[in-house]
Amino acid sequence: MTDQMMNEEQKRQLRNQRTFSFRLNLFFFATFVLFSVLIVRLATLQFVDSPRLKEMEVRAGTKDILIPPIRGTIYDASHRKIAYSTSTQSLYFRFDKDYSKTVKGVKVNQTEAIELARKIENVFAKYGDPKLPRMTADDIVKQMDLDAKMNYGYVPRRIKSGLTKEEIAYFMQHKHDFAALDIVEDSVRNYDPDTVAVQLVGYLKKYNAASSENGGLDYYKEIDNADVPPVDRYLENEDVGYDGLELLFQNELRGKNGLKSYPVDYSGNIIGHMELTKPVKGNDIWMTIHKDVQLKTEQAIMDHIKYIRSLPRSSLDAAPHARAGYAVAMEVKTGRIVAMASQPDYDPNIWRGGKISNEDYRNFEANLANGTIREVYQKYDSETEQFKHPSSVVPLGSVMKPLSVLIGLEEKLITPNTTYSDRGSFTFGKRGYERKVSNAFSVPNGVLTPSSAIEKSSNAFMSELIGNALYMRNGKKGVDLWDRYMEQFGLGVPTGSGLQGEQPGTKEYFHEAELSAQSALVFASWGQQGKYTTLQLAQYTAMLANRGKRLKPLFVSKITDAQGKTVKKFDKPEILNEVKLKKQYWDIVERGMRKVKVSGFDDFPYPLARKTGTSQQDVGGKRVENAVFIAYAPADDPVLAVAVVVPEGGFGGRGAAPIARKIFDAYDERIGLRGKPRNPAGKRAANIAASAVHRFSRREY
């Protein structure tokens, strides 16, 4: 072998050794990395994931069945139950077939379900409580909702709640004959049959409907049901608040789920005794609404509407198209709402089970929403007729004039000593484009002061000395200045109630100002360029009474737990903002309000500050007049502020004021305008009769 060949061989061996050494090092490095990853993973399992894995191990060895919580009770101010839940055994129909399937024009599965309903009817007839109304097969089929009009297809249908022991025993013993039925421990919501402030109290819906993409509420859509403990987890078929106080206090009212835990083997077979965690009852809320005052408020509205509708067309009080009325009574010093009526109302027990039929919805659609906080239209025979009538949110009319005078005084447009010769009208605008504002019936009021301008309700005074004067001084910027005053007095902004769907009203003066800032301010000065809710009116009236403090409306005075212990109080008024004006200005306004002529208060035993309003509105090609009225009493030490609105009710002094009188009387009897109830015990027979009349007449219009 030559030297050259030997060198080549040595080089080759050296290369092989290097390759082998590299591969060996690579192997050891890879092994090191792998073992490092395994060690880190084991450490993670041991110290980080251990609690979660242990929980999964326990859950894999148990079967949990959630028990829905018992919802808290809603009481009125006199400690009477307005909404309460009862625990019961309910019969559910499992919707596990396509009941719309047809064979030769026949819905075969529906035929099967109808036959099942007849069998259920026989069981109810034989073993049900004889004191309760008997369910027929037709009633049962309606509850089955075979065409899925009330529920999604997969939602079980509740047929009947409050099963007797005999009914339960029969269905359990004959399970093979009733395979589509389940008996479920259930919670049923009950509402006072006297229909007390039903739109404020609200109603319930099933959680799966309340959280659905179509028609659900954002409040429930945002709930992460997966990352909460079982006791806090929402059940798909659970009833939850969907409107009013039921929604506003959902967290407080709900309570916590109960839990039945069964030990099971890997095949799912139960291998031990059940562990029971009882459901925790939700907290109770205590409304500021007083049942007796509320019922008399509701009845006063319905009685007066019936009266003004029945009058001859020639009568000044006649209001043949009036169908609805809205009223709010607010305590001046506390902000507590003692009555809130949106009439006609409905029986909220139609929502038992968290659903409503299409038929009931059609019947009560116009009455479900709270017309004191949002726009609600009454139901008419045809859609075209429906849009020819105003909603529950109307212009203020002359009840704006106390505020207009305050603005005029504060902005130095007028002085306390200003006098004005009212000739019955005021004309403004460029030559050839003049517009005329007239008093009611164009009556000239003679020489007026700011106080007597309120008393006589002079449109001319407000238009020329306040609205037009503001425009002449500030031009278009006067509209923004006007808006700031409106918002300070709670008009055009939310009241702070927190209620779902509350509307801030409509500031029409901004729209009008695009055409003419002058006409916007002139018409706004006597209440024709803004539409606001009855609750806003009540808050504004309370500000006139307490001289500048805008109070948050309070609907609940306290929250208590299941043992009756108070967990939260709402005993202090919450001031949203305060308007500070000279005492002299407030005195001028009150002096005028005390002298306003009004029907129904001739023998009222307390000094009263009030203002009538007849707001004009163009709807459906015609002009209508809405009755508006505000008042507070006693004027020398204000306790209660009341606002009443009757769309198409005519003159405020006749179409709305008599309703307010009955509200003041009801409050005085049960609570006291001077701090002591005039009739603390009440007349039981009269109250029972009033409740019966109320139930009879609530659907009349």
Image: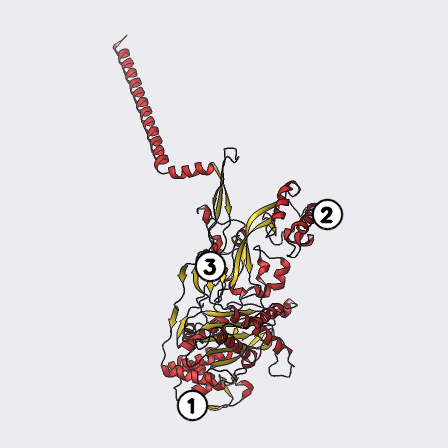
Task: Look at label 3 and name its amino acid.
Answer: Asp
Task: Look at label 1 and name its amino acid.
Answer: Thr
Q: Which residue is mark 1?
A: 419
Q: Which residue is mark 3?
A: 284
Q: How does the figure colour the protein chain or chains?
A: secondary structure
Q: Looking at the image, is 602 positioned above or below residue 669?
A: below
Classify the position of the N terminus by image quarter: top left
Tag in front: 2 or 3: 3
**Crowd around label 3: few <14 · some 14–19 · many ≥20 (10 Å):** many
**Label located before the other in sequence (1 or 3):** 3
- Residue sitting at x 62%, y 77%: 307
> Looking at the image, do the residues carrying marks 1 and 3 touch, with CB atoms under 8 Å apart?
no
Q: Which is more toward the observer, 397 or 548?
A: 548
- Give the side of residue 131 with respect to residue 563, left or right: right
Q: Position of residue 180 (x, y in %)?
A: 63, 44
Please say whether residue 96 is visible from this viewpoint.
no
| Distance of label 1 from label 3 (alpha carbons) | 57 Å
Tag in front: 1 or 2: 2
Q: Which mark is residue 106?
A: 2
- Give the side of residue 140 with respect to residue 243, left or right: right
Classify the position of the C terminus by image quarter: bottom right
Which element carries disc 1, helix, strand or loop?
A: loop
**Crowd around label 2: few <14 · some 14–19 · many ≥20 (10 Å):** few
Please say whether residue 374 is visible from this viewpoint.
yes
| Distance of label 2 from label 3 (alpha carbons) | 50 Å
- Give the side of residue 609 with respect to residue 7, left or right: right
Residue 359: quadrant of the picture: bottom right
Q: Looking at the image, is 137 positioned above or below residue 662?
A: above
Residue 404: quadrant of the picture: bottom left
Task: Look at label 2 and name its amino acid.
Answer: Val
Tag in front: 1 or 3: 3
